[in-house]
């Protein structure tokens, strides 16, 4: 027997969240029914375990990241010169084998791993965001609406061409000391900042975040904290 039942996802982000899924009962009746949904949660990366009831299919265990993920990392910029572009590999990178980058937790892990090496990194899709100065020691990485008075053209410091679908920021001297080719950087890929330590708060994996929303979309807030 095959029947469609509603799916109760228990906080997991599944392609058919809260929609009907197919349940297949074996003909001999001795085996457990099979749920025709083979996927992993887009938040936590786990493959769900199902409990089939008469009225719905329930995911047994709740998602650990049902409320989304806000990623905060710090970056030292002692030189006062910030390299910002989409791709700073192979100077800074993460282990692909240990990270499921197709999930929110995997992207957060990649961001934290990069930060430990000296690179503030965040996935932004193919959005080509810009770096805006919002105060003496504060910035955002955002796609600003043309009519947003909070983000005039005069506040835009540079734009990231996201062939890698991400932004990557590093201290210029650290980048060079690790073997980075400074000569290959464009003039718009080096931004003058006050020397110090900066906190990056990355929002792209927060619940409800929509990179394609109308109006201004802020991917990350940046502030000098020391």
Image (cartoon, rainbow, N blue to C red):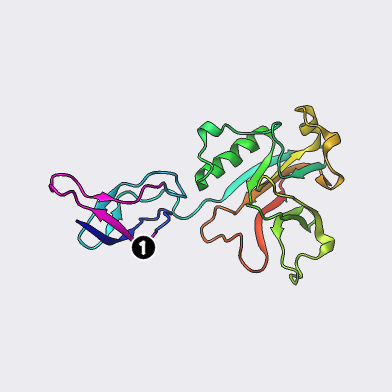
Residue 80 lies left or right of residue 115; in this view the side is right
Name above or below for residue 185 compared with residue 128.
above
Q: Nearer the viewer, residue 75 or 178?
A: 178
Name above or below for residue 173 compared with residue 137.
above
Residue 129 lies left or right of residue 110; in this view the side is right
Can you give x and y, in whole percent of width and height, for residue 199 in the image? Answer: 68, 46
Can you give x and y, in whole percent of width and height, for residue 162 in the image? Answer: 70, 49
**Residue 6 covered by magenta stretch:** no
Farthest bottom residue in view: 147
Q: Is residue 78 visible?
A: no
**Residue 22 covered by magenta stretch:** yes
Q: Residues within 10 Å of mark 1 (few under 14, many from 20)?
A: some
Which quadrant holds the C terminus? top right
Quarter of the figure with residue 7: bottom left
User: What range of the chain is rendered magenta?
Assistant: 17-39
Q: Is residue 26 visible?
A: yes
Name above or below for residue 18 compared with residue 179.
below
Task: Determine the residue positioned at 67% across, 55% down.
Answer: 127
| Residue behind mark 1 | 19
Q: Secondary structure at mark 1?
A: loop
Q: Main secondary structure of the magenta part?
A: loop
Q: Nearer the viewer, residue 149 or 9?
A: 9
Can you give x and y, in whole percent of width and height, for residue 143 in the image? Answer: 70, 60
Task: Determine the residue positioned at 80% across, 37% down.
Answer: 172
Residue 171 lies left or right of residue 73; in this view the side is right
Task: Determine the residue positioned at 61% across, 62% down.
Answer: 212
Quarter of the figure with residue 134: bottom right
Name above or below for residue 180 compared with residue 133.
above
């Amino acid at each position: 027997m095959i029947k469609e039942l509603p799916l109760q996802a228990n906080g997991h982000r599944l392609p058919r969240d809260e929609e009907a899924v197919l349940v297949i009962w074996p003909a001999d009746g001795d085996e457990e029914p099979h749920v025709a949904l083979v996927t992993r949660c887009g938040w936590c990366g786990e493959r769900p375990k199902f409990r089939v009831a008469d009225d719905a299919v329930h995911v047994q265990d709740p998602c650990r990241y049902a409320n989304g993920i806000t990623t905060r990392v710090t970056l030292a910029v002692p030189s006062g010169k910030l390299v910002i572009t989409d791709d700073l590999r192979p100077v800074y990178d993460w282990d692909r084998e240990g990270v499921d980058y197709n999930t929110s937790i995997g992207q957060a892990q990649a961001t934290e791993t990069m930060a430990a090496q000296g690179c503030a990194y965040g996935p932004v899709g193919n959005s080509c965001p810009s770096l805006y100065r919002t105060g003496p020691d504060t910035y955002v990485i955002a796609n600003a609406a043309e009519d947003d008075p909070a983000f005039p053209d005069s506040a835009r410091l540079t734009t990231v061409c996201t062939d890698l679908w991400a932004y990557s920021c590093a201290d210029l001297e650290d980048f060079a000391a690790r073997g980075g080719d400074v000569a290959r950087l464009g003039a718009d890929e080096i931004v003058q900042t006050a020397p110090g330590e900066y906190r990056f708060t990355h929002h792209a994996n927060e619940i409800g975040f929509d990179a394609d929303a109308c109006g201004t979309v802020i991917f990350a807030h940046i502030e000098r904290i020391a």
